[in-house]
Image (tube, helix red, strand yellow):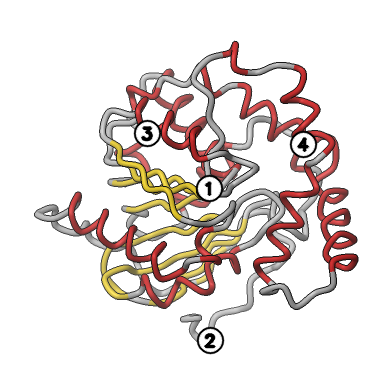
Amino acid sequence: MAVRRHEPPADESAPVLVRRLMGSGRRTLLIHGLGANASVYDQCAGLLADGHELWSAQLPWRGEGVGDWGRGPALGHWLAEALQLVPGGAEVVVTHSMSANVLLDLLDRESRQGADPFTRFGIRALVLVSPFYRGSAEDFDWQTISYYLNDFHLIMEEGIRVHSAGRLAEDIQRAMAYRVRDRVGPYGWLRFFDLYLGTPGLQTGRITVPSLVLGGEHDFAAPPGEGRTLAAALPDARVRILPTGHFPMIERPEQFAAEIREFVNSTLAGHPQRGSGPRTVLEHH
């Protein structure tokens, strides 16, 4: 991790942590999902570093949890803070799972208020990984609530399984998954599901930058059909479904990185990189 020795260490308990990782080129911010942390990108970061200046964000809903984030206002302000902490702005934003929904909600709220969030944050391209999306309110029913409430821990368990490469016994994985679920808590779960329920109302036509939706063929949390539906609702989007579950960056890091590199190279070709901000501080909180 490219952090200068003379810089003071970050306060790991801070709600938002943004770090420069490695590489040079397009400034790219990697954002984890609910109950995870920046380490979900460890296996693919080196593969992305050629042509990308990689930054990572740790948000309050990370696995270890920070405060009562689920009881506060809309989550977008945390993500906005992370975007603003990247010097010069993050040209490419790669965001996973619930955080993809937080980003879509933030962009939607900004646009409804008459702002241009893409200019404000310097975003030129989006990569939405395993997002939750339904195009119609009628697509939700009581069975949907029961599925995501009673089996919520299974998403956490899959993340632990793929992150550990199956080295942990099943009973240990299950116990760890329950602990992560309990850290998220009922209020955190309600935040997640409220974002999900809000997806039919998103004004997707205002997402004016090129977007790549990456899904997993075997994703039982955010089914690939939802990624296809979201891509079809965006003005300038392509969709790629990889032979993975909910964590394609861990399960297929080479393919995951290759899809992002090809997308960025093809969509931003001819667009000069924006100037960077000051580099005297590479770690923020």
Say which amino acid is labelled 4: Trp
18 relative to 265 in the view: left or right: right
Label 3 SS:
helix
Between the residue at mark 2 and the residue at mark 1, the CA separation in whole angstroms equals 24 Å
How far from the left and from the top, in percent, is residue 42?
54, 73
The vertical placement of 130 against 57, above or below, is above
How far from the left and from the top, in percent, is residue 30?
48, 59
Q: In which quarter of the image is the C terminus?
A: bottom right
Q: Foreground mark, 1 or 3?
A: 3
Say which amino acid is labelled 1: Glu
Say which amino acid is labelled 3: Ala
Label 2 SS:
loop
The numbered disc on residue 6 is: 2
How far from the left and from the top, in percent, is residue 21?
46, 74
How far from the left and from the top, in percent, is residue 208?
28, 32
Between the residue at mark 4 and the residue at mark 2, the CA separation in whole angstroms equals 40 Å
Mark 3, residue position: 231
